[in-house]
Image: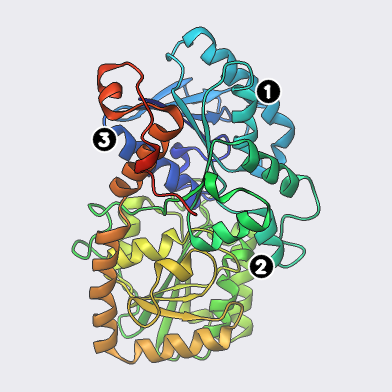
Amino acid sequence: MRIALVSAQASPLGLGGPTAGGRHTHVAALAKALGALSHEVTVYVRHEDKSLPKTVPFAPGVTIEHVPGGPVQPLPADDQLPLMGDFGRALADRWKSGGPDGGPDVVHAHYWLSGLAALTATADVRRPVVVTFHGLAAAERRHLPVDHNAGPGPRAGMERTLGSLADRVVAQSEDEVADLGRMGIRRATTVIVPPGVDPETFTPSGPAADHRRPGLRRILTVGPLVPRKGFGDLVEALRRVPGAELVIVGGPDPARPPRDIDADPEARRLLQLADTHGVADRVRIVGAVSQEDLAGWYRSADVLACAPWYEPSGLTPLEAMSCGVPVVAYEVGGIGESVIDNVTGVLVPPRDPNALAGALRALLGDEVRRMSFASAAIDRVRSRYTWERTATELERVYRTVTGVTEAADESGSDAGSDEDELSEVS
């Protein structure tokens, strides 16, 4: 099957960059997993780097295509709405009459902006469209402060329209399904497929990152340096967790200019906050790291702390759990489903640094409990959250919307639908 992953705002080539987040990881890992299932996968991203060729081989069966859409330069994702018409029409031109890449059998868009481009691209030559939102405006408005949320713009209405027009909406958690239902998206067109983890990269065994202060327990947190990730809450909590350090993995790449992490505005804010709370000597900001190095940072931790104000999927806790690291997290979005309270970690009410501190202090002081959580975490990820399983479940979604059976896919001809095989939300 020819699969188009439309991810205008998150290129797999951006992994490890200062603004890379869960969406970059998700699209890159999903593309590789689908390629490993012998599908022909093309990831379409907006052309924003003149140094990159139009086509980049990425993994077996996977190619990245850079598509024109606005100025060839990086732009904030949510500034790209005016560009999605051109981006979508450029996709349509590629796919007309088979196009240079044969044209896709199914289009899977990631994020609402890419979804709009996918609808434009398939307006004349009909192809099934599947969309994963990776966060919803309505949910952000509930969870984020006014100055950080999606605001009153057109996004919420466009997400509602997109969800109604798409052939399938892929939710990543029950929490997201509830949000989609409140938006009026029919549950018959919604299916839950949670994200996965690469169990060969994120393993309990292997090298671990350095401990500059071996006498301190390590609290690790991971993500792009943006306020909504809640790193400030963790800094505040740290003053109530003696004998521990907070290591933040995210932000600028220290190997690329400018190398000074302190030049990042959010890094400066966090370090100033740490100084205000008297914990500056126990806070370390590492910067961006590769996926392979990230596994070593997980293995170096006594506990992973996740304090986002809103998190639709909860990929970071899964990576830590796969490395045998227990999690203390705010119970928000997908995290409340990937982490089992008092089994693989501890869940606390969101936006409550005091509760966060209490859970961290208790878990760091109980080695037997940490070991029990770590063992259960590994088992949970291996049984439920692998990219192979995610890709297999999405493969069934694609076959349903295209009507292509496995036998027909192997022979190159179309056949009937396997709708009855798909476990949808009812």
Q: Residues within 10 Å of mark 3 (few under 14, many from 20)?
A: some
From mark 1 to mark 3, how far is it between C-alphas? 32 Å
Residue position for label 1: 86
Can residue 376 be seen here? Answer: yes
190 lies left or right of 156: left
Q: Which picture quadrant has residue 300? A: bottom left
Name the amino acid, label 2: His
* Mark found first going from the N terminus, 2 or 3: 3
Quadrant (top left/top right/bottom left/bottom right) for the N terminus: top left
Q: How is the image coloured?
A: rainbow
Visible residue check, residue 209: no
Residue wearing tag 3: 36
In percent of the image, x 29 and y 79: which residue is there?
373
Residue type (three-letter) at the residue carrying disc 1: Asp
Q: Earlier in the sequence, mark 1 or mark 3?
A: 3
Q: SS of the residue at dot 2? A: helix
Query: How far across and down, in percent of the image, does residue 284 sit?
Result: 47, 71
Element on which disc 1 rests:
helix
Q: Which residue is mark 2?
A: 143
